Image (tube, helix red, strand yellow):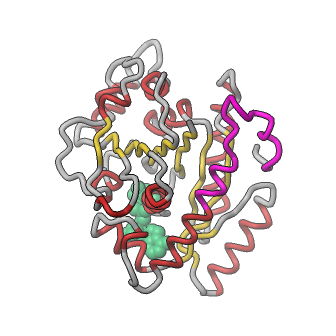
């Protein structure tokens, strides 16, 4: 199983768009995928065409639920002609009240999501995180093998990514397997302005140890999410093909970084932290 958390404590940088773009690429490749929507805003859930989920990820967070993620997964509503339709562990409205409750567990509730992943074996599992460093994001970081930090090429992006990396390092120090690794820093919504080029260059300079895949600014990406459609299913819509190709490349980067039990030797070959 390859498990990836899409993270940044900063809001609106494109975590959900990248999650959905990767889900679309995986569907096209016929890769069975589970999307875990850990954000109370529920944008990944609606982006996958689920508007009134009957169950959700909250059910595995409220109590220890060994292997429970499979029981709350449901098939998404993307059209059936777009390949292997992803599954979703949905965000439900009560997810927002779950986080403060987790904080009151005297034994610590940072590994509830991890416990729910036990014995599950999705070829690809992607967790869309909320824009905060609270217990929901911490649960994701304790549960996954790798992270993808998403950022915009803008002012404060370098500092924002630094803060995120610090948090990931703290979790790595607490986990006996020293995961999650950082698979890359995706520079999203990259446009043609001088400002974008400046901040992109800055990110390249500061984070030269990491892969920095780019996702360009394209209206088709926003349209796909708004219409609850995979980017690969937008047909000839201008920019859709190019965006889809960028997500394909990003998925390849993440999958090549698979260092699960079977090929842990590869861990060092891709420049991870
Ligand atoms: N590459 C892109 N090109 C054009 N629009 C984009 C792109 N990436 C994201 N957007 C748009 O930017 C907005 C914010 O993106 P998104 O919701 O994915 O960010 P987020 O990090 O998940 O936000 P939050 O932190 O609130 O969860 C959305 O309206 C989305 O459609
Ligand atoms: Mg989001």
- Where ligand 1 lies, by image quadrant? bottom left
Q: Is residue 11 magenta?
A: no
Q: Where residue 173 sits in the image (x, y, percent)? A: 70, 28
Q: Quadrant of residue 268?
A: top right
The residue sitting at 44% across, 62% down in the picture is 17
Q: Where residue 215 sits in the image (x, y, percent)? A: 57, 70
The residue sitting at 40% across, 42% down in the picture is 36
Query: In this view of the protein, which residue sits in the foreground, 179 or 109?
Result: 179
Query: Does the rendering let one see residue 260?
Result: yes
Q: Where residue 243 sits in the image (x, y, percent)? A: 51, 74
Name the side, left or right, on which 112 lies relative to 182.
left
In the image, the segment drawn in magenta is 250-270
Name the side, left or right, on which 165 lies relative to 41.
right
Query: In this view of the protein, which residue sits in the foreground, 166 or 241?
Result: 241
Q: Is residue 222 above or below residue 264?
A: below
Q: Is residue 269 magenta?
A: yes
The residue sitting at 22% across, 42% down in the picture is 93
Q: Is residue 258 above or below residue 191?
A: above
Q: Is residue 179 above or below residue 15?
A: above
Query: Does the rendering let one see residue 11?
Result: no
Q: Mainly helix, strand or loop, the magenta region?
A: helix
Q: Where residue 239 sits in the image (x, y, percent)? A: 47, 82
Q: Quadrant of the C terminus?
A: top right
């Amino acid at each position: 199983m390859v498990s990836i958390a899409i993270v940044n404590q900063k809001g609106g940088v494109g975590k959900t768009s990248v999650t959905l773009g990767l889900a679309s690429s995986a569907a096209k490749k016929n890769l069975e995928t589970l999307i875990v929507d850990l954000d109370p805003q529920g944008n990944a859930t609606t982006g996958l065409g689920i508007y009134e989920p009957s169950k959700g990820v909250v059910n595995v967070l409220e109590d220890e639920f060994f292997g429970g993620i499979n029981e709350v997964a449901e098939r998404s509503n993307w059209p059936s002609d777009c390949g292997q339709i992803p599954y979703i562990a949905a965000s439900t409205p009560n997810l927002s009240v779950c986080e403060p409750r987790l904080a009151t567990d005297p034994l610590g509730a940072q590994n509830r999501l991890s416990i729910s992943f036990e014995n599950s074996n999705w070829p690809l599992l992607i967790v869309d995180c909320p824009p905060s460093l609270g217990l929901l994001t911490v649960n994701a970081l304790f549960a996954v093998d790798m992270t993808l930090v998403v950022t915009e090429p803008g002012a404060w992006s370098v500092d924002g990514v630094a803060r995120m990396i610090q948090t990931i390092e703290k979790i790595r120090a607490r986990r006996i397997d020293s995961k999650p690794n950082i698979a890359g820093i995706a520079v999203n919504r990259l446009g043609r302005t001088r400002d974008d080029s400046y901040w992109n260059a800055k990110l390249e300079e500061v984070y030269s140890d990491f892969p920095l895949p780019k996702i360009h600014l394209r209206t088709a990406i926003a349209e796909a999410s708004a219409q609850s459609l995979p980017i690969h299913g937008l047909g000839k819509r201008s920019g859709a093909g190019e965006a889809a190709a960028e997500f394909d490349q990003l998925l390849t980067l993440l999958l090549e970084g698979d260092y699960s039990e079977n090929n842990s030797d590869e861990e060092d070959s891709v420049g991870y932290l």
